[in-house]
Amino acid sequence: MTTDTHTHNQLATDGIISVLPGRFTPLPGRLYSVGIHPWHTDNATDAHLALLSQCATHPQVVAIGETGLDSLRGAPLDRQTEIFERHLQLAQSLRKPLIIHCVRTSQQVLASCRRLGVAVPVAIHGMRGNERVAQPLLGAGFYLSFGPQFNPATVLATPHDRLLIETDDSGQCIEAVAARIAPLLGITAATLLTQAAANLQRFLTATH
Ligand SMILES: [Zn+2]
């Protein structure tokens, strides 16, 4: 069962492994997302972007990301936006969903998606923002993916069919993350895992 929307554990068998294009060496049976992380935008070159486009076509690459905008780290925001929008265009042309890192930039992320007419499914990963931040993202039809740290009110405000879970770089297992979030929703961790797997499946296949 694929339940983990976003992990940096390169050996994970139950989730989407996030890798930089230069480190993409797929293992059999694993699922991947490729992207230039906003923190790595400082030294991103055209060669990196070309490699990204090439890796992105691989059948084991089921999503584009993580990509996004981070106002606290990485290149200046205009350069980050340029690189982010290349990812959006790539996702659109390959009809693959997007996994987005968004730190204090939700309005800019929404503006880029709107400007480029992004129609593939979008997940905001590692969602920690409050409800005020979440509502416009949910209004745009985005999925929200919650990891070990989350805002409880935002989890409760997320429609059940748009809620994803992830381990990111925590080193925890997805069952532990589910066990922290499930009680808030009044369901068991097993039910949340089943629900998250169904949502992730829909997120991955909606474009086909
Ligand atoms: Zn990550």
Image: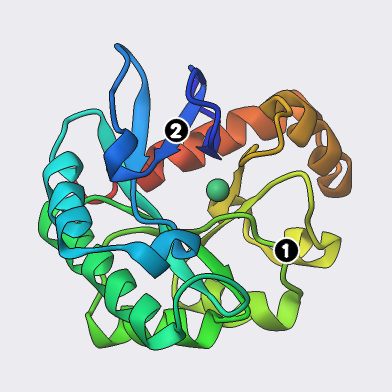
Q: Residue at x 16, y 47 (%)?
A: 51
Give, as a three-letter code, the residue at label 2: Ile
Task: Label 1: state its secondary structure.
Answer: loop
Q: Which mark is residue 17?
A: 2
Could you tell me residue 134's position as x and y percent? 64, 74
Q: As shown in the figure, which amino acid type bears the numbered disc 1?
A: Arg
**Proximity of marks 1 and 2: CB atoms separated by less than 8 Å:** no
Which residue appears at 39% of the width and 76% of the height?
80
- Of pointers 1 and 2, the one earlier in the residue sequence: 2
Between residues 168 and 51, which one lies in front from this camera angle?
51
Q: Compared with residue 76, is residue 97 higher up or lower down, i.e. above or below?
A: above
Counting from the top left corner in percent of width and height, residue 29 is at 32, 13
Image coordinates for residue 17, horizontal then vertical, percent: 44, 33
Report how far apart the C-alphas of labels 1 and 2 lie in the structure: 20 Å
Of tags 1 and 2, which is closer to the observer? Answer: 2
Q: Is residue 165 left or right of 30 when viewed as pictured?
A: right
Q: Quadrant of residue 59?
A: top left
Q: Determine the residue positioned at 78% across, 56% down.
A: 150
Residue 163, disc: none
Above or below, comparing residue 34 to residue 41 in the picture: above
> Which residue position is annotated with label 1?
128
Picture quarter containing residue 118?
Answer: bottom left
